[in-house]
Amino acid sequence: MMRSGDVLRIGAVVACVVSAQGGSLFVNPSAAPGGKGTEAAPFRTIAEAQSAVRGLRQSGSPTPDGPTEIVLAAGTYTLSDTWKFSKQDSGSARAPVVWRSDGKGAARVIGGIPISAARFHPVSDEGILQRIPEGARAHVVVADLADLVPGKIPELADSYGAAPNPPLLYVNHRLMELARWPNEGWTSFTNATDHGIDKETKKKYPGAFLYGNPRIRRWHPEEGVWLNGFWTHDWDNRSLRVATINTSSNEIRLAGVSPYGIAGGTWGRKDRRFYAFNLLDELDAPGEWYVDRTRKLLYLYPPEGKLAGGEEIVLTLANRPLVRFEPESRHICLRHLSFEYSYDTVITLANVEDIEIDGCAIANGAQGGIHLNGRKCAVRRCDIGNLGRGGISVSGGDRKQLIRADNVLENNRIHDYAQFQKTYAAGIHVNGVGQVIRHNEICRAPHCAVLYGGNDHLFEYNDVHHVLLETGDAGAYYTGRDWTTQGTVLRYNFTHELGSGAEGVGNTMGFYFDDCDCGDEVYGNIFWKVSRGIMIGGGREHPVRNNIFAACHIGMSIDARGMIWKQWNNPADPSWCLDKKARDLNYQEEPWKSRYPRLANIWNDSPREPLYNPVETNLFLDCQKEVLVLDENTRKLQEKLAIDGNLAVNTTGESSLAKPDPRVKGVGSVSGTAGNPIVLGFRDAARGDFRIESGAELFRLMPGFRRIPVEAFGIQKQQEVK
């Protein structure tokens, strides 16, 4: 334990060093022990530098009039425990504490257990070799983990929806796949012999289904076989253990419970997708692995077919974040550092203020990338990817008092996430009040890009593409089933090239305001090659103006489900009791009453009707199936709605393209021909380039349409992540 006199002496020494070096301390993992934190004699570890900075503050020495920088030299800093920041590590608004790399991304902070390639050797156990597919036997190698992994390796849970129990294996920064079949994609079944739902009580229990592929005879359920699948809905994914395989009847009976049963009342396609994994008998592809949890033997088919000897091989076991900012941490910046390998979320921040994560790389976490709760914090210019759950989760502010948090996420690239939790693990998950999300690129994921609730957020200039790749009845931006999520603005976002949904055309959305959600303003966005640009699912106060829907199956739709669904505002269903959610926030009192007056008066204003959803001055360009869809009850309300000034354009007069529904008012149409197409003036709309000059034909056809600042979409070049 450090005594107060030691702290004072360290503080005095460090104060001299910091003063002499212009506010900088230096760390180098290759340095000799006993360094003083100077550039010539740097500290060797992050812990030494952190103790020195704490000593500086505790000694009462003058704080530099500017940032204190701790400069980490290029190299790898392996942590055996979480790197923790607290109040005593904080700087001030004038003098923040900055931890940075001396070259962008050159300093790597990693967790996990490194494994030498020399630990692996060819499989010699004849019984194991006979189970490995013949073509893979010469490639698969084995390593004994007994001395690396203390205690028992936990079994996988019977039913789970996120990461499997540890360990996880990475080779050269890439997550290895527990041996599976099929090696890519899905197989399916159509005949559920037991839906796993009690007809009277509706209680769920393990179900069963028929699957006739003869390869199931090779599997060994007694050793542990799991199936990952979309068991009933294409928005719910779960891994379930197999209890038994009846090779006579081809019935697979499960040991794990699916929350919606097995083919338990889906409204989509009948066939249900799954794949099998954790199978030594299917270890047949580069990048696959299997661990014998009892004998602590790890079997690997190396990603390049063999191990050359210089690979970085890491096993993650510990369920703890790599970095944690504890409550009351303030005025700290992490800049140009790389963080990698954590079974938990990589970086967590709880009740913090003015923390900045700038230009960092965050990868290979079994859970999320960053979980941030605080105020006036920023995550910018980061590359965040290869994660088991979501990219960034941000919250803060006070919803009852509508006090903003003013956290900012900007110019980040978020990609290849939701590798384990395939649904509702978003690239960016937003809650609280007053978060700003701008200039981010979000891509390559099975489900949503943005999931949000709360109030008064701003989403602008974001580039979202190639998400919703494996799911249906889902939105790239999703919020739902809440009257109180008011005040959010979505403007100038580019949403394009999304998955079409497993259940067919129109089943994935660009913006999805689900189940009577209310209060989002939509202006100046572009939806290109999206199954359905916008769905307003029974909610209110969603003005949709000055947007472009191009090459979409369905431009947008509004329905009146609140008028006909029996679960609307059902007190017996907490998720559907909309009034209860609002009352919990005192929505008829200040400041809510003034901020959202229509919500405060909703019970006097036809609460079940989808009112105050103006659809004005939108361009529907070459939509394929429908332009603007109103269900029967919404069409009856058109006198209460403001639908006006919209235009549907069929560039070449192609007969298969959508025409406006004549029952829907406020949508005009123009059509060209193959020989005389309508040229609106976009640079190259067929390839997603919607830059346009001020004198273009579009503005003659739609005088009220305003130019959308396409050049500002996505990560800005001067802020680009390197």
Image (tube, rainbow, N blue to C red):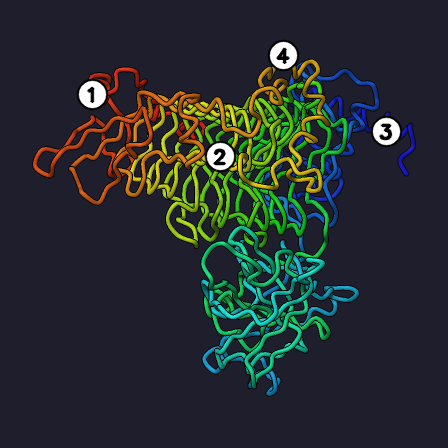
Q: Residues within 10 Å of mark 1 (few under 14, many from 20)?
A: few
Distance in Å between CA atoms under marks 1 and 4: 42 Å
- Label 1 residue SS: loop
Q: Is residue 64 above or below residue 608?
A: above
Q: Position of residue 706 (x, y in %)?
A: 32, 18
Residue 226 % position (x, y): 61, 68
Residue 329 horizontal side relative to residue 524, left or right: right
Q: CA distance from mark 4 to mark 2?
A: 27 Å
Q: Nearer the viewer, mark 4 or mark 2?
A: 2
Q: Amino acid at mark 4?
A: Ser
Residue at image mark 1: 696
Whether tag 4 and tag 2 are in contact, CB under 8 A, the answer is no
Q: Are marks 1 and 2 in contact (CB under 8 Å)?
A: no
Image marks 3 and 4: residues in contact by CB distance under 8 Å: no
Q: Residue at x 61, y 44 (%)?
A: 368
The answer for how far apart the CA atoms under marks 2 and 3 are is 67 Å
Q: Quadrant of the N terminus?
A: top right
Frontmost of labels 1 and 4 is: 4
Give the number of the disc on residue 7: 3
Q: Nearer the viewer, mark 1 or mark 2?
A: 2
The residue at 30%/15% (across/down) is 704
Label 1 to label 2: alpha-carbon separation:
37 Å
The kind of residue tagged 3 is: Val
Residue 501: in sight, yes or no?
yes
- Of labels 2 and 3, earlier in sequence is 3
